[in-house]
Image (spheres, helix red, strand yellow):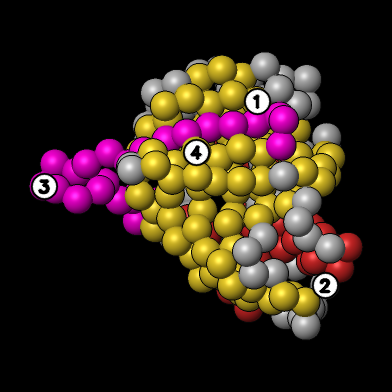
């Protein structure tokens, strides 16, 4: 094997270790306060369905511009109840890069916290949101307190995040009936171990110096049961992969 080829292989390995290191740091809980949440994930992005970023591939467009919202049915952070609250994230990968390969260098990662939360709940949602929806993926980070709502009319789900973002989407039917599901994609974390695949009817966003306006793009829906123990194990597993 040539010296040049060995050098290229070593550079690729080093790049992979950097990504894993960033993921491990981002997913490491900020403190040891135990938490647990159950509810639904609503997610959309600018890629064609299904989003290639979860398979560590290049985005459909030059960048992947996306949103995730956790609608919490039941939840606690230590002794703080979180029932009926929501927390979301808008983020974007750099040009020509997928979300996984550019982790830590995203163009921005903004966290949106439900305005219905009291001060103690807001701190809890910030801690959980920063772990499950990692703000550490970018050096450009902001936190917003804003209304977050969802309406369901028939098969259509509509999510509104303050005055800045809105999208609606519906699930697509699988070839053998029922909805299409994706299980354990290469980029899976505890939140994305399994999700149902759909497409957007519309998707807009105007914060972070952005002006998104998409339709017919990737939409995802999932139910979740998450807790701090899962994410501690997830971070430990990533650290082990680094070694």
Count neighbours of disc 3 (C-alpha within 10 A) and say few if under 14, some if 14 to 19, many if 20 or more.
few
- Dot 1 or dot 2: first in sequence order is 2
* Residue at mark 4 to residue at mark 2: CA–CA distance: 33 Å
- Dot 1 or dot 4: first in sequence order is 4
The mark found on residue 176 in the picture is 3
Q: Mark 4 points at which residue?
A: 158
* Residue at mark 1 to residue at mark 4: CA–CA distance: 14 Å
Q: Who is closer to the viewer here, 61 or 151?
A: 151
Q: What stretch is highlighted in magenta?
A: 162-185
User: Against 72, is 144 above or below?
Assistant: above
Count neighbours of disc 2 (C-alpha within 10 A) and say few if under 14, some if 14 to 19, many if 20 or more.
few
Which of labels 1 and 2 is toward the front?
1
* Residue at mark 3 to residue at mark 1: CA–CA distance: 35 Å
Residue 117 in percent (x, y) is at: 78, 60
- Looking at the rendering, in which quadrant would you find the C terminus? bottom right
- Dot 3 or dot 2: first in sequence order is 2
* Residue at mark 3 to residue at mark 4: CA–CA distance: 27 Å
- Dot 3 or dot 1: first in sequence order is 3
Residue drawn at x 66%, y 46% as measured from the top left: 148
Q: In which quarter of the image is residue 101?
A: top right
Q: Name the residue under label 2.
A: 31
Which of labels 3 and 4 is toward the front?
4
């Amino acid at each position: 094997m040539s010296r040049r080829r060995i050098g290229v292989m070593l550079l690729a390995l080093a790049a992979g270790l950097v990504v894993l290191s960033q993921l491990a740091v981002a997913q490491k809980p900020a403190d040891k306060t135990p938490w647990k949440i159950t509810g639904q994930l609503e997610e959309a992005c600018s890629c064609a369905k299904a989003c290639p970023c979860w398979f560590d591939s290049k985005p459909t467009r030059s960048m992947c511009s996306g949103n995730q919202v956790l609608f919490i049915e039941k939840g606690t952070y230590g002794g703080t109840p979180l029932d009926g609250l929501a927390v979301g994230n808008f983020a974007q990968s750099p040009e020509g890069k997928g979300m996984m390969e550019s982790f830590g260098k995203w163009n921005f990662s903004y966290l949106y916290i439900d305005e219905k939360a009291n001060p103690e709940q807001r701190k809890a949602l910030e801690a959980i949101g920063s772990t499950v929806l990692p703000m550490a993926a970018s050096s450009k980070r902001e936190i917003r307190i804003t209304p977050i709502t969802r309406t369901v009319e028939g098969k259509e789900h509509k999510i509104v995040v303050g005055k800045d973002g809105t999208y609606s989407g519906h699930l697509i039917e699988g070839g053998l009936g029922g909805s299409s599901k994706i299980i354990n994609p290469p980029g899976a974390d505890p939140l994305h171990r399994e999700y149902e695949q759909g497409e957007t009817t519309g998707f807009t966003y105007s914060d972070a110096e952005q002006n998104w306006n998409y339709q017919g793009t990737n939409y995802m829906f999932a139910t979740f049961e998450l807790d701090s123990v899962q994410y501690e194990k997830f971070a430990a597993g990533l650290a082990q992969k680094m070694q």
